[in-house]
Amino acid sequence: MTTTDTRRSRRGRPPTAVASDASTAVPTVPPAAEDRIAFRAAGLVHVYREAGTDVAALRGVDLTVAAGARIALLGPSGSGKSTLLTIAAGIMRPSAGRVSVFGTDLGSASERDLRRLRGGTLGLMLQGASVNLLLHETAIGNVTWATRGTANSSTRIGRHVLRAGGIADDGRLVSAMSPSEQQTVALAVAMAPRPRLLLADEPTSQLDDEARDRLLDVLVETAEAQGTAVLVVTHDEQVAARMQRMIHLRDGRIGEEATDRGRYAVVGTDGSIQIPEALRAAWPAGSLVTVEQGDGDTLRIVRADGEDS
């Protein structure tokens, strides 16, 4: 028989599994708690139609993002990262489960409530920089437009991002800029209104390493100074490393989470645990196993070699 041990982690000891940090239902958030939870998903499911077939992009995601926390979403293409970010922005409604931003339930929120969120609480940078911008405006014009009607209409943060990205105030229209320059402007626009929750999909994918690192410095410093929560979709491990938590999605579920304390598998609400990527070849789908309580904080996963199904 083949055996794998799973232990609750202690500092300095490689972990394998932890319980997820959200329950299956999001209770009504009391006013005192609204400012402490920037984003919460519980049992989040999203299904869309493609070529006449239902496709499950998210399959029961449980995720809590505290105010001021920085989270990276990683995973292969099609794992559900961008879908999760789009639902967090209130652009798409969940098919099932609950999702909220600072206490506002996005599944039942009115369009007026969603506009209010996007008007100041949320900063949004979608994938494809040009979709976030006014192409007939300058970089500064875009930043100024983004801060209109906000409690603090200062363009200081947006200008700071533009300078860090090397965007000169030369009057060029955004439509005349390169893809990397447009991406920098899009990040400046998302950060300029000082949102409480910044959502960014591949914010540095068009940048070279030096420009990426300069903008990450500004993003992290600004988020810490303003208490902004950050949820970033990325394939870049260097971007993810600047966040406090790295959430790995696979097949529409959260499979692993990494922090400065180690890398963990995540126990889902239904009790499921995904086999870590590095071990999947040895434990293929359909493997029969028994799960047993071991000594102390240990679970024993034992392969039933040769047994019939």
Image: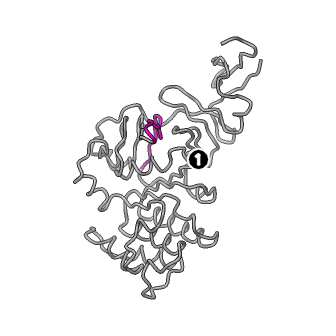
Is residue 213 found left or right of 135 in the rendered image?
right
Q: Which residue is mark 1?
A: 75
Q: Residue at x 50, y 44 (%)?
A: 80
Outermost residue on the bottom side: it is 170
Q: Is residue 285 above or below residue 40?
A: above
Magenta: main secondary structure: strand
Q: Nearer the viewer, residue 250 or 159?
A: 250
Q: Is residue 195 above or below residue 180?
A: above
Is residue 101 found left or right of 76 in the rendered image?
left
Label 1 secondary element: loop
Quarter of the image holding residue 142? bottom left
Q: Is residue 172 above or below residue 94?
A: below
Residue 280 picture location, percent across and down:
69, 34
Asked if residue 193 lies in the magenta stretch, the reply is no
Outermost residue on the right side: it is 1
Q: How is the image coloured?
A: one colour
- As shown in the figure, which amino acid type bears the numbered disc 1? Gly
Task: Please identify the quadrant where the N terminus is shown.
Answer: top right
Q: Nearer the viewer, residue 134 or 197?
A: 134
Residue 260 picture location, percent across and down:
62, 49
Outermost residue on the top side: it is 308
Task: Please identify the quadrant where the C terminus is shown.
Answer: top right
Categorize mark 1 by other alpha carbons within 10 Å: few (<14), some (14-19), many (20+).
many
Residue 75 picture location, percent across and down:
58, 47
Q: Nearer the viewer, residue 192 or 250?
A: 250
Is residue 22 found left or right of 6 in the rendered image?
left
Residue 272 picture location, percent across and down:
55, 27
In the rendered structure, which segment of residues is drawn in magenta?
Answer: 51-66
Asked if residue 65 lies in the magenta stretch, the reply is yes
